[in-house]
Amino acid sequence: MLYTRASEAANVIAGRAPGPIGAGVVLGSGLGGLADRLSDPVAMPYAELPHFPMTTVAGHPGRLLIGGIGGLRVAMFQGRFHHYEGHDLECVTFPIRVLHRLGVPRVILTAATGGIRDDLGPGSIVCLSDHLNLMGVSPLRGRNDDRLGPRFLDLSEVYSSRLRSLAREEAARLGFVLPEGVYACMPGPNYETPAEIRMLRALGADVVGMSTVPEAIVARHSGLEVLGLVIVTNWAAGISPAPLSHAEVIEASLAVGGRLADLIDAVLRRLSTEPDAGRSPVPVPVP
Ligand SMILES: O=P(O)(O)O[C@H]1O[C@H](CO)[C@@H](O)[C@H]1O
Ligand code: HPA
């Protein structure tokens, strides 16, 4: 059962890095270097954690690091799982369930994306205001376990307006404007066709990717606050003058990763001053 598996993984993690955790961060393609910001990190390869699948995509090393940023203890997932790898969405979102069982109150989701809106070219950092789930399925499909969250979930505000304004303020302090945008989640692993990108633009999408949305839905199901910060690594298909490639995506992530790391660092430091910074009810009882 998912609740038991997530609790077992949480217990192992809490045993190896005890203490409350104030935020989780999922690191997207080529963004694993953000974890270098952690002080005194404890590293746990997914292979050493119960029920974690293996990552298979370049730029997703596959380990969990727990360490400090400012006064906050943070869990960073260096590598995520994607539906197109063949994992079901329960698997894809397992790290979020584990955060919930660890008592982590919020998560920052990062990703590499293609830019659709005219002002969101390569190198942009975008704060997600909303999403379009075009994956064709919800990660909440199947029998609901009420211990994990409600059967019918309200998604009126997936991406916390409080965290969004905090991120905007911290970006301004760092000297740049943080635009907001709507993320369209496509199933992948192929990139989109130009006609699909025209469709996505007409539907109101600003950036496109193949992840993030299942994690955001499950985080809300689990009652976590969500902040989505993505980088635009390429113009989307049909807008881009060149064919798209994952090597280009990783190269562009690495180029902008430092600025995103500065922003996430600043947001986490700001959160560390809040009264509920890290309130983990560990160890987690497994039924
Ligand atoms: O969303 P992340 O994991 O950052 O990766 C993005 O980059 C890959 C395509 O290059 C896809 O997996 C897409 O979702
Ligand atoms: O253009 C893209 N499409 C889908 N996913 C992506 N991830 C990075 N760039 C893209």
Image (cartoon, rainbow, N blue to C red):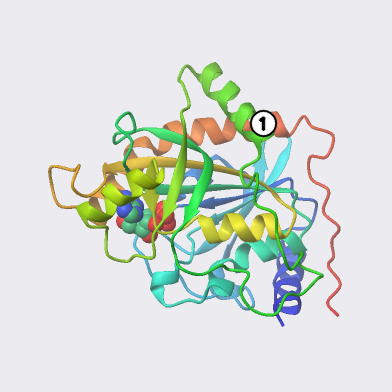
Query: Which residue: 69% across, 32% down?
Result: 162
Q: In which quadrant of the rendered view does residue 82 lie? A: bottom left
Let me know if residue 114 appears in the view.
Answer: no
Above or below residue 222? Residue 108 is above
The residue nearer to you, when weighing 138 against 246, is 138
Query: Which residue: 71% across, 51% down?
Result: 224
Residue 77 at x, y percent in the picture: 56, 57
Residue most extreme to the front:
202
User: Dividing the image into 4 quarters, which one contains the C terminus?
Assistant: bottom right
Q: Is residue 161 left or right of residue 230?
A: right
Q: Which residue is mark 1?
A: 269
Let me know if residue 98 appears in the view.
Answer: yes
Above or below residue 59? Residue 182 is above
User: Dividing the image into 4 quarters, which one contains the N terminus?
Assistant: bottom right
The residue nearer to you, when weighing 153 against 215, is 153
Q: Does any atom of ligand 1 lie closer than 8 Å to the CB of label 1?
A: no
Query: Looking at numbered disc 1 in the image, what kind of residue is underneath it?
Result: Arg
Residue 284 at x, y percent in the picture: 83, 67
Rendered-image quarter of ligand 1: bottom left
Residue most extreme to the bottom:
1
Residue 72 at x, y percent in the picture: 72, 39
Above or below residue 15? Residue 198 is above
Residue 116 at x, y percent in the picture: 31, 41
Mark 1 falls on what kind of element? helix
Q: In which quadrant of the rendered view does residue 43 lie? A: bottom right
Query: Which residue: 51% across, 20% down?
Result: 174
The residue nearer to you, when weighing 142 against 248, is 142
Few, some or many residues within 10 Å of mark 1 (<14, 14–19, 20+) = some
The residue nearer to you, when weighing 176 against 206, is 206
